[in-house]
Image (spheres, rainbow, N blue to C red):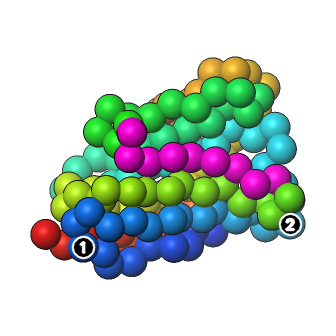
Amino acid sequence: QVQLVESGGGLVQAGGSLRLSCAASGRTFSSYAMGWFRQAPGKEREFVAGISSSGTKTYYADSVKGRFTISGDDAKSTNNLQMNSLKPEDTAVYYCAADRRRLTSTVLTTTPEYEYWGQGTQVTVSS
């Protein structure tokens, strides 16, 4: 069983930045597909960014492309989401997800494709 714990959420003004981190209990993310999703009140959980299990590909939702960057740090066993130029519409609970069932260069973008989920961290962007 893999336990994921997100950190780094908070309140920021529009135009500001936050860095979210996802840590796995007792293991590294080597050969895991990693993803970040978010869910705003009254809306479905949506894909934000992901990195393939091969580590060779990243993919972003159009709404965050050019502003958010996903990266992994195997030495620290963390996956990070750097969020710049934040907008009020980025306000949501952000979830880290991981999957180790397949080794692929494809980025997983849907919730059923991920085996493990964190509890989420709140990001609030004020206007």
Q: Residue at x 32, y 32 (%)?
A: 62
Residue 60, visible in the rendered structure: yes
Q: Is residue 8 left or right of residue 73?
A: left
Q: Within the magenta stretch, is there residue 60?
A: no
Q: Quadrant of residue 42?
A: bottom left
Give residue 81's position: percent from left, percent from top.
53, 55
The answer to which of marks 2 and 1 sits earlier in the sequence is 1
Q: Residue at x 64, y 48 (%)?
A: 71
Front residue (pair 78, 118): 78
Q: Residue at x 64, y 43 (%)?
A: 34
Instruction: Answer above or below: position of 31 versus 106.
Output: below
Q: In 3D space, how far apart are the residues under numbered discs 2 and 1 (Cα atoms)?
A: 35 Å
Residue 53, visible in the rendered structure: no
Q: Residues within 10 Å of mark 1 (few under 14, many from 20)?
A: some
Q: Quadrant of residue 122?
A: bottom left
Quadrant containing the N terminus is bottom right
Residue, disc 1:
13
Front residue (pair 103, 77): 77
Q: Residue farthest to the top?
A: 105
Q: Which mark is residue 119?
A: none
Give residue 113's position: percent from left, percent from top.
57, 33
Quadrant containing the C terminus is bottom left
Write the start and end of the magenta stretch as one range: 66-74
Q: Main secondary structure of the magenta part?
A: strand
Give residue 100's position: percent from left, percent from top.
76, 38
Q: Residues within 10 Å of mark 2 (few under 14, many from 20)?
A: few
Q: Secondary structure at mark 2?
A: loop
From the image, state whether disc 2 or disc 1 is nearer to you: 1
Residue, disc 2:
26
| Residue type, label 2 | Gly
Q: Residue at x 56, y 46 (%)?
A: 70
